[in-house]
Amino acid sequence: MDQPSNQDNQRLFSLLKSLQKASKDLQKIPFFSTHEPQSTVEHFLDLEKDESPVFNDDPNLFKLSQLLCDLKTKLEKLQKYQGYSLPCILRRQIINYKIYQVACAIETEIRVYFDRESVQNLVGTLEGSADEDEKVKVLDDFEKRLSQGFDIHFQDLILKAKIFSILEHVLCDPSCSIRIRDQVALVIASLVRFNKDVFVGLVLMGPTVRALISMSSCCSIRVLSLLINFIRIPLVDELEAHKEIPRIISILSSENVEIQAGAIDCILGIAYYGRREAIEAMLEAGLVEKLVKLQRLEKQSSVGENGTTNEDGSKSDPETDSNEVWSAGNCPFEGCVARFAVQLEAGEMLSKKEKIEFKLEILRRVRETSVSEAEIASIVAEVLWGSSP
């Protein structure tokens, strides 16, 4: 059988969209009414006349074609009962209810058809297309569909097509561009949000998290932060078990402020959901020392932005200062040591004794790392006043 042309596909898509809208309008016909909205009925009947030649070539539309024939019969029957006698009114209400049921079924069937096409298009494009823009577009469209909420039929299509495995393969493929892999990462996060019960296990068992850390792009680190907040304790346990926490801490050394900010969000999530071993791994990786340095650089850049003098007496120039990347408004590191301490103290997995021990350890490291008594006093005060007693 010849493949349908792009023009035929566009016509079919347009017709299905129109039928979907018409079916929604038909669902709005009140059951207890003395007459039906004539324009809605006529519009549907006009669309129904156009469907037969288009639907005959696609077996996936057979059920939809049957539903449309059934609905057409009911609409024609409805037009026969236009009187205001009690029997006519009652018959109209019964028929209206049946029309509502069939219209709902039609809308569902069209959505299933679009979902099937979406899944097939995603698989075909990721596996067979070399066009980067096309891949990004189908991934973005797929993410938007996931954002509409859980749908058991759509999930079945995703699982049968092994979408997660395909996405995971692309995410871990260094030959793919960061742009595509970033978009894949967003889709994986949307899948977890779509149904945690199914897709969390796939994330934990596979290389997804390690791939996100290895990419260390703005988007991948943001997605990692999202996954920590979605999956919580099980993901933090996996990060600690696979020694991934020091790698996350090392991202704080990135020259990209947005990546550093994403790493901070990951760290705060780990602090809240982490067990003792995870917190120890962060401290041993030099987290407090890095946070103190980031906080110091932000304060210095803020001072420089105001045009005050440096320690050597020279005037700071925000246009030429070597810390330009840390300019005010771009560095979300103010009070980051205290924010880390607060997350630890509010966390779910530490005992009261452990929280006290870790706070003392944080304060010790702050004193060792700070370059002046003023800096020590400032950060210690933030930690003590920012945390719960």
Image (spheres, grey):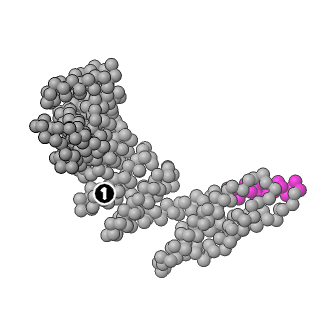
Q: In the rendered view, would you say 148 is above or below 341?
A: below
Magenta stretch, main secondary structure, is: helix
| Residue 58 position in % (x across, y down) | 54, 72
Q: Nearer the viewer, residue 337 or 276?
A: 337
Q: Pointer 1: residues within 10 angstroms few (<14), some, or many (20+)?
A: many
Q: Picture coordinates of residue 5 (x, y %)?
A: 48, 78
Please state which of residues 119 and 220 is positioned toward the viewer in this rendering.
Answer: 220
Q: Is residue 61 left or right of residue 85?
A: left
Residue placed under numbered mark 1 in the picture = 181
> Is 102 located above or below residue 302 in the figure?
below
**Residue 269, located in which quarter of the rendered image?**
top left
Residue 92 left/right relative to 278? right
| Residue 82 visible somewhere in the drawing | yes
Q: Nearer the viewer, residue 328 or 184?
A: 328
Which amino acid does the dot numbered 1 rest on? Arg
Q: Is residue 100 magenta?
A: yes
- Which image quarter: residue 182? bottom left
Residues in magenta, as a range: 85-101
Q: Can you say whether 188 is above or below 21 in the image?
A: above
